[in-house]
Image: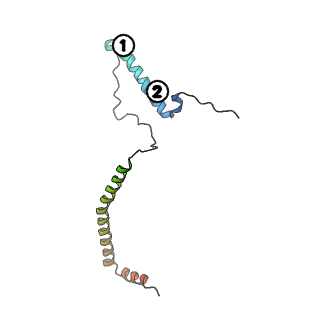
Amino acid sequence: MAEPTFSMTADDDMPRTIRREREAREREAREREARESLPGPASVPSIDRDGPYDLPSPAATVTAIDVPFGRLMAFFLKAVFAAIPALVVLTVLLWLFGQGLQTFFPQLLKLKILIYMPQ
């Protein structure tokens, strides 16, 4: 079985999209230098790349987030305290919904009693 050959250059290790993006930037830099080296009015004006036709950034994958334990704990404590008013509001809304159902459908109360009274 033949052994795979691995190149030791950093270019081959990068994903293809990042490599192409870097090559495009290098090509634009060479073209910009060539245009600037031309004398006077014969140079071509540069194209603005910040418009709506800008190419999207290459996709990325986050593999690790380094957050100190103290800060992470503080964040989750803040999240718990921020969730308390939301739970109160949710409880009130569900209670009002239940009261509305009992008002408009009184037969549900009889069903509730039948379920709770096993024989």
Residue 4 spot, x, y in % from top left: 64, 33
Residue occupying the far front of the picture: 70
Residue 115 spot, x, y in % from top left: 43, 82
Q: Residues within 10 Å of mark 2 (few under 14, many from 20)?
A: few
Is 93 located above or below residue 36 in the figure? below
Q: Nearer the viewer, residue 101 or 59?
A: 59
| Residue visible at 36% across and 81% down in the picture | 109
Count of labels in the image: 2
Residue occupying the far bottom of the picture: 119
CB under 8 Å between discs 1 and 2: no
Identify the disc placed on residue 118: none
Q: Which residue is mark 2?
A: 23
| Residue visible at 62% across and 30% down in the picture | 5
C-alpha span from label 1 to label 2 = 23 Å
Is 113 located above or below residue 60 in the figure? below
Disc 1 element: loop
| Residue visible at 54% across and 30% down in the picture | 12
Q: Residues within 10 Å of mark 1 (few under 14, many from 20)?
A: few
Amino acid type, label 2: Glu
Q: Quadrant of the N terminus?
A: top right
Residue occupying the far top of the picture: 39
Q: Point out the frontmost of discs 1 and 2.
A: 2
| Residue visible at 36% across and 14% down in the picture | 37
Q: Nearer the viewer, residue 108 or 18?
A: 18
Q: Which residue is mark 1?
A: 38
Amino acid type, label 1: Leu
